[in-house]
Every structure is written in structure tokens, then in C-alpha cells.
Image (cartoon, rainbow, N blue to C red):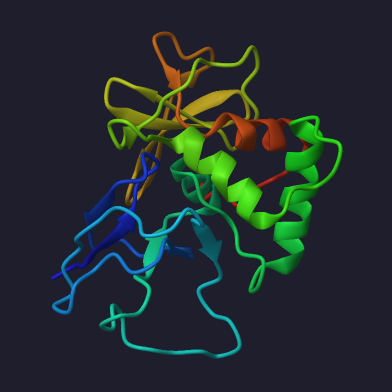
Amino acid sequence: MPRRNRVTPFGELVAVPARGAFLGNRGCLHDGHGAIRRGWATRAWICCLLDFKGRRQPLMQPGCYTELFFRDEATALAAGHRPCAQCRRADFDRFRAHWTNGNRLAAPPRAPDLDARLHAERIDTATRARRLHPLPPDLPDGAFVARGGDAFLVAAGRLHRWSPDGYADAGPLPPDGAALLTPPSIVAALADGYRPHMGI
């Protein structure tokens, strides 16, 4: 039976058999029986490599972080995760440089400051619900929009409907009646030139 550790672009955790291309971490979300009890335990939501220095451990060990999985990096970014500064150091440095420039900051933020900004953009702290945002004038490749309860990846001027098993072409831009799903500060990094892995 699949574990409830696959992440949708909305940041929801679902139990599906589809495998992931990236690993994620939001702290320990599960109890001693492996059941998910919370949506996050830290503001640092990160996107990691599946394999790093040959490390192996059984999934969802009691008291350890909950291993989450993403279809691709674009899905992780839409959910509000950022590249890990340890196992993906070069990607983190590249992401932070584009994030700094795209958001017109004078200097690169410390990781905790970046995480605090992303947390405010992905979660409404009053309701603990996922936040959606107005669409910017232009949507860069790698951004996600939400429409009618579905998530759509923007790539090569077209929308692609997300599912755990892959993407289906859903038509050209603009996405009428849609809202921005990827946090705006990440969209600014994408517009500045950060290119995530997209599994299409």
C-alpha cells in the first residue's frame, strides 16, 4: 500500500504508487506508526536529491524527518519547497542568486529568511490553508497555476495538467480564470532565469 508521502503542486500529501524524482523534507510529520499527523513541522521546506553519498534508511522512522517525494522540481517549487543547501548546494546557490535578483534584493538572504518569506507566501497563517496569488503579467516556464481544482505547469507557452503519473497538454496560454500557485517570490526567480527540472 502506498504511503501518504507524495506531494502535489498544492503542497498536499497523497498516497499514490507513482515514484518521485526528488526527495523532500518539512520535518517529522508522522507518528510512530507512520501515519501523517501534520502538514509541516518547520518553515524550511526543502527539495533534495534521491541519493546523496549513498545514505540509506527505512522510510518514516519514528522521530526522524518524513521523507516526501515530488514528481519533478517544478512540483516541489509550486508546493513551496526550495533546493537543499547541502545535497544540492550548486542548485541552491543558483536558485538563491536568481531569487535575490528576481525579487530585487540588495543582498542574498540567509536561508532562514528565505524560508520565512516562502512560508508566508504558501500558507495563510490565520487559516493554515494554502495561499493562491494573482497571476503576474507573464508566466515563466516552470510556474504552476491553479484552475478548477487542478494544477497546470507552464512550459513553452502552453499549460500542462499535472497528475501523479505525468502531464497532459491542456492548451495554450493565457490560463483564463486561473490563480498563481507557485509562490510569487519563486516565480520571480524563474522569470530571472532559474530553470527547474520539469518532468514533461
Q: Quick one: which residue is furthest to the right in this view?
A: 106
The residue closer to the viewer here, 158 or 180, is 180
Q: Quadrant of the N terminus?
A: bottom left
Q: Is residue 79 visible?
A: yes
Residue 156, compared with residue 62, is above or below; it is: above
The residue closer to the viewer here, 181 or 40, is 40
| Left-right relation of 120 to 52 | left
> In the figure, residue 61 lies in which quadrant?
bottom left
Residue at point 48%, 26% (across, down): 159
Residue at point 35%, 79% (across, down): 64
In this figure, what is the number of numbered marks? 0
The residue closer to the viewer here, 92 or 1, is 92
Q: Position of residue 6 (x, y in %)?
A: 32, 58
Q: Position of residue 48 (x, y in %)?
A: 55, 67
Residue at point 37%, 70% (across, down): 67
Residue 45, compared with residue 180, is above or below; it is: below
Residue 12, compared with residue 21, is above or below; it is: above
Residue 84, compared with residue 196, is above or below; it is: below
Q: Quick one: which residue is furthest to the front in this view?
A: 126
Q: Is residue 141 visible?
A: no
Q: Position of residue 90 (x, y in %)?
A: 76, 64
Q: Quick one: which residue is furthest to the top in this view?
A: 176
Q: Position of residue 45 (x, y in %)?
A: 49, 56
Residue at point 20%, 63% (across, down): 36
The residue closer to the viewer here, 6 or 32, is 32
> In the figure, residue 83 lies in which quadrant?
bottom right
